[in-house]
Image (spheres, rainbow, N blue to C red):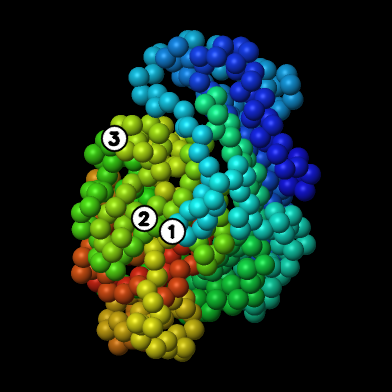
Amino acid sequence: MSAESIRAGVELELAARVVELVRQAAGPSAEAEVVVRHDAEALTRFAVSMIHQNVAEAVTTVGLRLHLDGRTASGATTVVGADGLRGLVERTVAAARLSPPDTTWPGLAPPSPLHHSAGYHGSGEHSRLDFGFDEATARATPAERAELVRDFVSAADGLETAGFCRTVYTSAAFVNSAGQSVEGRTAEAAMDGIARAGGADGVARLASGRLSDLDGALLGARAAAKARAARNPVELPPGRYEVVLEPEAVSDLLANLSVFGFNGKSYAQKQSFAELEADQFDPSVTLVDEPLGSRDEHAPGLPFDDEGTPRESLVLVREGVTKAVAHDRTSAAEAGAVSTGHASGMSRTWGPFPNHVRLEASPAATLPPVDESIGAVAASARPLVARMERGLLITDLWYTRVLDQKTLVITGLTRNGVWLVENGEVTAAVGNMRFTQSYPQALASGMVLGIGGESVLLPDRWSGTRYAAPALHLASWNLTGNASG
């Protein structure tokens, strides 16, 4: 089933049909929640400066979670005909009767309207939300993606390139036996590519709710400029360095802070650094989860979670003070809180976490003038670089792994360009280095020297996640060795 052929409301009809089948099979006392998702993803990949793969996949999945006589079971199917739905219900009812008692069952989400807004304030009562949805992106063709790839390759001006251009469309509905019934849809486009010059790589990435927002030529030129500037790197000794992290690197901070820190299950089990109402970050730091998209990017996700709870903006950190963690209904019951709309298929196991986090940018007027001569540097990083006396400019972090979850000490490597900065000027390319750093400590009071004036929406690192990040100027980053040894 393609994005073009799916009609509005079909997922809602499927979900309601499954709830009715549950009533027939298990009686009125059974508590059931059904999520139906149609996901269509198309990917155009290129390597050695040529498109080598163009693939598309579309699938409709029906997920059922059932609570019966104090026991819980789940099931799913991609067979959406009458026999497939009936088989799903029969299997799940049988599994529930054989399951151990579930003392953590939080009950079903009550009927609640969706929040019809992006930004900090939700309003409106609608069973279906298409706010900010871009039909052209949902229906994007291989030719449109290929055009962006062509522009990227051409702008690299002879350098070897590789990467992808992707469009994703999702239409979903939720129905439960308590009367909650909601639906929505979302679309997103992303481009991620590298250029290579003399063994040095440069990267450019961008995501948006609209394919038309992606400029292949601009991204290709940026990747090429980075690659050329990263040639002939020098090695620096390990130690603590002042750093400017470009948005690509900052997105890794946001991802790990979200998954391991602002995770409601980790918080309830005291495995998170988060302490509500505590000054844990620099006063310049404000983090907001924006599942409905920001006013600037218009890239909304689905307006409800897998338990049918409406989503809205959630302020995680305001001016350095930790204000909230993400909850599904299970973690909220354990913590004595309410669900924030972060249930997913894996949240009961791994915990609910925010997956549309933005680090708020600083007003551009407070930053020093931009030095346009620093051509390979992201726009939001240039003013920060211009005022750094001596430190490192880091494009990207990768292969990051948690060493200690409670303090969120992370180890990983730099990637796709590191440079030495002296008196506001890039003076040398630097070889990649390993780091070991507590992310909350790096963002603690007094450690944030500046935040860029523009947040950039970046492609997901984990499925279903996206983070909007400006550049970040930090007083100290612990680099523990060179990547070569």
**Residue drawn at the location 27% of the way across and 74% of the way down:** 449
How crowded is the residue under tag 3: few (<14 C-alpha within 10 Å), some, or many (20+)? Answer: few
Is 136 or 409 nearer to us in this picture? 136
CB-based contact (under 8 Å), mark 2 and mark 1: yes
- SS at mark 1? loop
How crowded is the residue under tag 1: few (<14 C-alpha within 10 Å), some, or many (20+)? Answer: some
Q: Amino acid at mark 1?
A: Tyr
Residue located beneath label 1 in the image: 120
**Residue drawn at the location 27% of the way across and 84% of the way down:** 389
Above or below: residue 343 compared with residue 458: above
Query: Which image quarter holds the N terminus?
Result: top right
Residues under labels 2 and 1: Cα distance?
A: 8 Å
* Lateral position of residue 90 relative to residue 56, left or right: left
Q: Nearer the viewer, mark 2 or mark 1?
A: 1
- Residue 52 rendering spot, x and y as whole percentages: 71, 57
| Residue 357 visible | no
Marking on residue 315: 2
- Residue 373 rendering spot, x and y as whole percentages: 46, 89
Marking on residue 201: none
Q: Amino acid at mark 3?
A: Gly
How crowded is the residue under tag 2: few (<14 C-alpha within 10 Å), some, or many (20+)? Answer: some
2 or 3: tag closer to the N-terminus: 2
Q: Amino acid at mark 2?
A: Val
Is 474 or 484 nearer to us in this picture? 474
